[in-house]
Amino acid sequence: MPEVTDQPPEQPSPAQPRPNPIVDAPATVEACAEDFASGASVRAQMFKQQARQR
C-alpha cells in the first residue's frame, strides 16, 4: 500500500468563523434591484416548469 504524504488542508476552527461577504455588504435599493433583475431568467424558467406540472 503506498504511503500517503499529502496532508489535508487545515480547516478553520469553529471558534473562528470565516467572514461572510453577503452579510458585510450594505443592502441598497440599487443592489437589490440589480439582484432581482439578474434572476429574471431563473424565475421565467421556474414558472415554465411549474406550468408544465399542473
Image: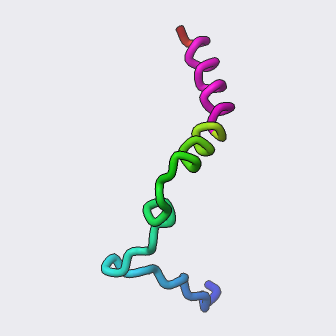
Question: What residue is rendered at 64% in x and 18% in y?
Answer: 48
Q: Nearer the viewer, residue 27 or 39?
A: 27
* Visual colour scheme: rainbow
Q: Residue at x 64, y 37 (%)?
A: 37
Q: Looking at this rendering, what residue extends furthest in the front direction?
A: 29
Dominant SS in magenta = helix
Against 23, residue 48 (above or below) is above
State the residue at coordinates (57%, 50%).
Answer: 31
Task: Please provide the residue range marked out in magenta.
Answer: 39-52
Can you give x and y, in whole percent of width and height, for residue 4 in the image? Answer: 60, 87
Asked whether residue 47 is drawn in magenta, I would say yes
- The image shows residue 2, relative to residue 20, as above or below, that is below
Q: How many marks?
A: 0
**In the rendered image of this protein, does residue 42 appear above or below residue 16?**
above
Where in the figure is residue 26, as x and y percent of width and height?
47, 60
Q: Is residue 18 left or right of residue 53?
A: left
Residue 23 pos. (x, y %): 43, 61
Residue farthest along the top direction in this orientation: 54
Residue 20 pos. (x, y %): 46, 67
Q: Residue at x 50, y 51 (%)?
A: 28
View extreme (left): residue: 15
Q: Is residue 28 magenta?
A: no
Relative depth, front residue between 22 and 13: 22
Quarter holding the N terminus?
A: bottom right
